[in-house]
Image (spheres, grey):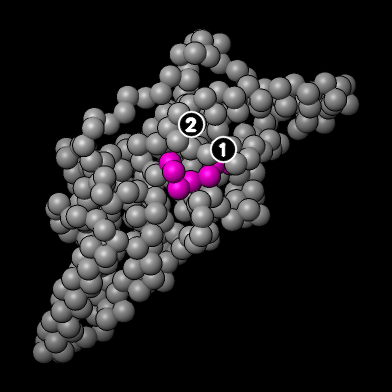
């Protein structure tokens, strides 16, 4: 069962985070794969165009990173030097056309590009990208997911590893928005952890609060219901009341954090079971434009043993997800 935190007062927990200074823009990095085929970018365009629905272009400065596959991929069958050179020239031309096209799409979306870089799609380049994010003090990492047509960032777990190891909030775009008119619908999975509270404090600095209607969802995991020995001896009515009361405290706490930032709270959901699974099932049923979760940012052996709600949700195929650290 999720318990109400007692180490801090409710008043201190609901204090908003320090806001960005007036006129200071959000520093975000967009990573897209620049394929080596004429149809490069097909499907990614629409996701880039909708990025402005999540992040105000006028309040952002964008760094663009091209993730480039090995130009020799798939050419091992060519033994003739001239044919190999012709293929490489064609791929180089396609790459240049693709980068130019992506620049145009980013400009159409309203973003000003402050820097451009290229990294190969390889495990070696991941640390270089993470170092760049840290050294340049980026505040948001945006990736176009591998389920968009023409995008293959998921190759060799490239995208998933970046999402898991980045130390800044990460927006993973996997599909077009469902709600084309009115407010976007966002599902915010919350609990009593500091990671979840931090996500609520930072949310208004990352996305446009006036365009998003939030559904707050908390997942209760009572051990008694999963224990065949103890379950018959537990008063289920009392347990249900306790869970509802606990959820009510969380909803009130997070509402106090989110409303001053300009967010509309459209609904509240109390779920029972595994947090990642239940949030995923709810998203499948309600089709939100965005799932929001906080992350403890655990690494290494501890992350492997414990897992995390955010890392599990990232592997669901059909949802845009914002992981806030």
Horizontal side, residue 48 vs residue 10: left or right: left
Helix, strand or loop at label 2? It is helix
Q: Magenta span has 210?
A: yes
Of the numbered discs 2 and 1, the one sitting upstream in the chain is 2
Quadrant position of the C terminus in the picture: top left
Q: Quadrant of residue 285?
A: bottom right
Q: Magenta span has 12?
A: no
The boundaries of the magenta stretch are: 209-215
Q: Residue at x 78, y 31 (%)?
A: 225
Q: Relative to 126, is 146 above or below?
A: below
Horizontal side, residue 111 vs residue 318: left or right: left
Q: Residue furthest right?
A: 232
x and y, in percent, of residue 139 in the image: 28, 39
Q: Residue at x 64, y 50 (%)?
A: 281
Q: Relative to 109, is 303 above or below?
A: above
Q: Is any part of residue 297 visible from this angle?
A: no
Q: CA distance from mark 2 to mark 1?
A: 8 Å
Instruction: Please rate how many residues cluster around mark 1, counting C-alpha atoms within 10 Å: few if below 14, some from 14 to 19, many from 20.
Output: some
The residue under label 2 is 258
Horizontal side, residue 167 vs residue 200: left or right: left
The residue under label 1 is 265
Helix, strand or loop at label 1? It is strand
Q: Residue at x 39, y 32 (%)?
A: 202
The total of numbered circles placed on residues is 2
x and y, in percent, of residue 303 in the image: 45, 35
Q: Quadrant of residue 198?
A: top left
x and y, in percent, of residue 52 in the image: 34, 55
Instruction: Please rate how many residues cluster around mark 2, counting C-alpha atoms within 10 Å: few if below 14, some from 14 to 19, many from 20.
Output: many
Q: Nearer the viewer, residue 124 or 274?
A: 274
Mark 2 and mark 1 residues within 8 Å of each other at the beta carbon: yes
x and y, in percent, of residue 67 in the image: 25, 60
């Amino acid at each position: 069962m999720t318990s109400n935190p007692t180490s801090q007062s409710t008043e201190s927990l609901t204090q908003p985070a320090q806001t960005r200074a007036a006129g200071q823009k959000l520093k975000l990095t967009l990573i897209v794969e620049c394929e080596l085929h004429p149809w490069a970018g097909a499907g990614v365009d629409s996701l880039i165009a909708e990025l402005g629905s999540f992040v105000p272009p006028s309040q952002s400065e964008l760094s663009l990173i091209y993730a480039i596959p090995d130009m020799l991929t798939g050419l091992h069958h060519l033994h003739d030097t001239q044919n190999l050179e012709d293929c490489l020239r064609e791929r180089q031309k396609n790459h240049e056309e693709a980068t130019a096209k992506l620049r145009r799409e980013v400009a159409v979306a309203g973003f000003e590009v402050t820097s451009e870089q290229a990294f190969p799609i390889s495990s070696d380049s991941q640390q270089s990208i993470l170092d760049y994010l840290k050294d340049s003090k980026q505040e948001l990492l945006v990736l176009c997911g591998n389920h968009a047509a023409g995008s293959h960032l998921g190759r060799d777990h490239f995208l998933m590893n970046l999402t898991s190891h980045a130390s800044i909030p990460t927006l993973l775009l996997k599909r077009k928005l469902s709600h084309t008119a009115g407010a976007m619908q966002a599902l915010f999975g919350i609990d009593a952890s500091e990671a979840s509270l931090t996500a609520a404090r930072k949310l208004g600095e990352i996305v446009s609060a006036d365009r998003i209607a939030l559904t707050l969802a908390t997942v209760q995991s009572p051990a008694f219901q999963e224990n065949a020995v103890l379950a018959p001896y537990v008063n289920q009515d009392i347990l249900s009341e306790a869970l509802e009361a606990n959820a009510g405290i969380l909803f009130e706490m997070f509402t106090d954090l989110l409303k001053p930032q300009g967010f509309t709270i459209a609904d509240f959901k109390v779920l029972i079971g595994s947090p990642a699974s239940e949030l995923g099932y709810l998203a499948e049923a309600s089709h939100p434009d965005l799932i929001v979760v906080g992350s403890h940012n655990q690494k290494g052996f501890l992350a492997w043993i414990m897992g995390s709600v955010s890392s599990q949700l990232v592997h669901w195929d059909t949802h845009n997800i914002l992981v806030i650290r």
